[in-house]
Image (cartoon, grey):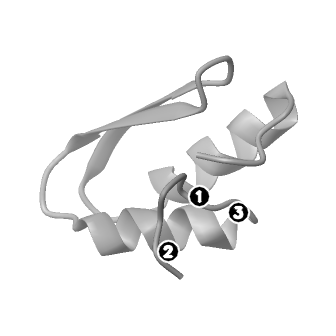
Amino acid sequence: MSGMTCGHCASSVSAEIGKVGGVGDVQVDLASGRVTVSGSGFSDDEIRTAVEEAGYRLAGADS
């Protein structure tokens, strides 16, 4: 993910992804810019949309 620079950024991303139905847990690693999502019943597109709603972009994402 690109654009995250602080704990507030990580919190915002985590909160938005957590709103997606079926998401059980969200772990944001600010240093690496990685987000790990667990649960079931959600799509990659739903996670991408949540990240964008938080104001960020997945690294390497087409858009």
Label 2 CA crowd tier, 10 Å (few <14, some 14–19, many 20+): some
Residue 20 screen position, x and y as percent: 39, 64
The residue under the point 62% across, 70% down is 52
In the displayed structure, would residue 51 be above or below residue 26? below
Question: Residues under labels 1 and 3: Cα distance?
Answer: 6 Å
> Is 63 displayed left or right of 57 in the figure?
left
Residue mark closest to the camera, 1 vs 3: 3
Q: Amino acid at mark 3?
A: Ala
Quadrant location, the C terminus: bottom right
Residue type, numbered disc 1 = Glu
Mark 2: which secondary structure?
helix
**Residue 24's disc number:** none
- Per the image, the residue denoted by label 1 is 16
Relative to 27, 46 lies left or right: left
- The percent coordinates of residue 4 (x first, y second) are 77, 40
Q: Quick one: label 1 or label 3, which is nearer the N terminus? A: 1
Residue that label 2 marks: 49
Give the distance between the C-alpha atoms of the residues marked 2 and 1, in whole angstroms.
9 Å
Furthest residue in direction left, as rendered = 41
> Helix, strand, or loop for circle 1?
helix
Residue found at x 58% / y 46%: 1
